[in-house]
Image (spheres, rainbow, N blue to C red):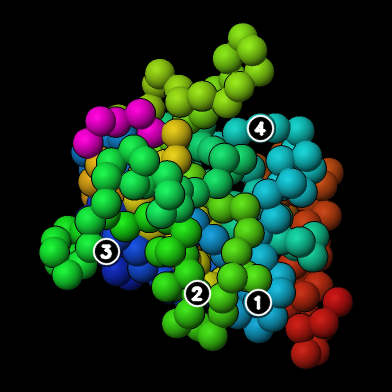
């Protein structure tokens, strides 16, 4: 995939331990770059026309016979549609099974701090960060779902436990998500709940919004699995049928 300044729409670096959100349009791409290494970008995705439709972790994994996410994978909604596809990935192992940190996890690992004392450097947690951003769209607790954790590798030990992987992302690792349908994208850079760091990790991320051509019929993500091809077709019908119903 050839990325140039001509297809760049917007770029910004976001600090670690923070949260933000945006509406991505079908046909655009979101490129995330781990600038220092060891970042974690947690993400939720919802259909802005019907927020009951959101990213579905179980269907995404079982439909593609995988436990990890990487280039060639498609992210399915719970309506069986392709929300976005991973068209570039230099890291190769992203987690979507272990959730996000909450206030209790952060306090147990890294202590307690309040905005009144630490101002913008207070220790944020993932669950509250998601809820703050969801609230900007009139959404709340019932809209939480299993999230993505970009740039985090989770492994299974000999006893079957999910554990922090030895090989985490390096400076400059990047992933590009091509959006097949419009989506509300909720993100935070709070630490992963299994991160063993002794100090609260604040790893920045650069994100870029880019224009990309529509996927061809022989697109790698479309043809990766029969389930992926059906999801792309479901998305095509959603866009074609008047009123967005299929």
Q: Earlier in the sequence, mark 3 or mark 1?
A: 3
Q: What residue is shown with label 3?
A: 11
Q: Earlier in the sequence, mark 1 or mark 4?
A: 1
Q: What residue is shown with label 2?
A: 134
Mark 2: few, some, or many residues within 10 Å (few <14, many ≥20)? many
| Residue appearing at x 61%, y 22% in the figure | 161
Mark 3: few, some, or many residues within 10 Å (few <14, many ≥20)? some
- Report the quarter where the C terminus lies: bottom right
The answer to whether residue 178 of the structure is visible from this angle is: yes
| Residue appearing at x 77%, y 48% in the figure | 59
Q: Position of residue 87 (x, y in %)?
A: 53, 47
| Residue appearing at x 43%, y 73% in the figure | 133
Q: Pointer 3 and pointer 1: residues touching (CB < 8 Å)?
A: no
Can you tell which mark lies on residue 51? 1
Could you tell me how far apart the alpha carbons at marks 3 and 1 are, in whole angstroms? Answer: 26 Å
- Up/down of 110 relative to 28, above or below: above
Query: Range of the magenta residues?
Result: 195-199
Q: What residue is shown with label 4?
A: 67
Q: Earlier in the sequence, mark 2 or mark 3?
A: 3
- Report the quarter where the N terminus lies: top left
Could you tell me how far apart the alpha carbons at marks 2 and 1 are, in whole angstroms? Answer: 10 Å
Q: Earlier in the sequence, mark 3 or mark 4?
A: 3
Helix, strand or loop status at disc 1: strand
Q: Earlier in the sequence, mark 2 or mark 1?
A: 1
- Quarter of the view holding residue 199: top left
């Amino acid at each position: 995939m050839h990325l140039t300044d001509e297809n760049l729409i917007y770029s910004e670096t976001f600090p670690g331990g923070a949260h933000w959100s945006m509406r991505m349009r079908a046909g655009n791409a979101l490129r995330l770059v781990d600038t220092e290494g060891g970042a974690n970008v947690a993400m939720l995705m919802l259909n802005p026309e019907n927020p009951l439709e959101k990213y579905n972790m179980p269907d995404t994994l079982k439909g593609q016979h995988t436990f990890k996410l990487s280039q060639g994978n498609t992210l399915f909604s719970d309506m069986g549609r392709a929300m976005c596809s991973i068209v570039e990935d230099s890291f190769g192992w992203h987690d979507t099974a272990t959730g996000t940190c909450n206030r209790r996890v952060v306090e147990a690992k890294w202590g307690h701090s309040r905005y009144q004392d630490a101002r913008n450097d207070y220790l944020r947690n993932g669950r509250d960060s998601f809820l703050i951003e969801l609230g900007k769209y009139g959404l709340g607790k019932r809209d939480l779902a299993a999230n993505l954790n970009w740039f985090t590798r989770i492994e299974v030990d000999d006893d079957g436990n999910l554990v922090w992987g030895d090989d985490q992302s390096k400076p400059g690792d990047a992933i590009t998500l091509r959006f097949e349908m419009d989506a509300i994208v909720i993100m935070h850079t709070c630490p992963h709940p299994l991160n063993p760091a002794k100090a609260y990790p604040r790893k920045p991320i650069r994100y870029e919004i880019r224009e990309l051509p529509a996927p061809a019929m022989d697109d790698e993500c479309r043809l990766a699995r029969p389930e992926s091809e059906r999801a792309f077709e479901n998305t095509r019908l959603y866009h074609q049928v008047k009123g967005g119903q299929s």
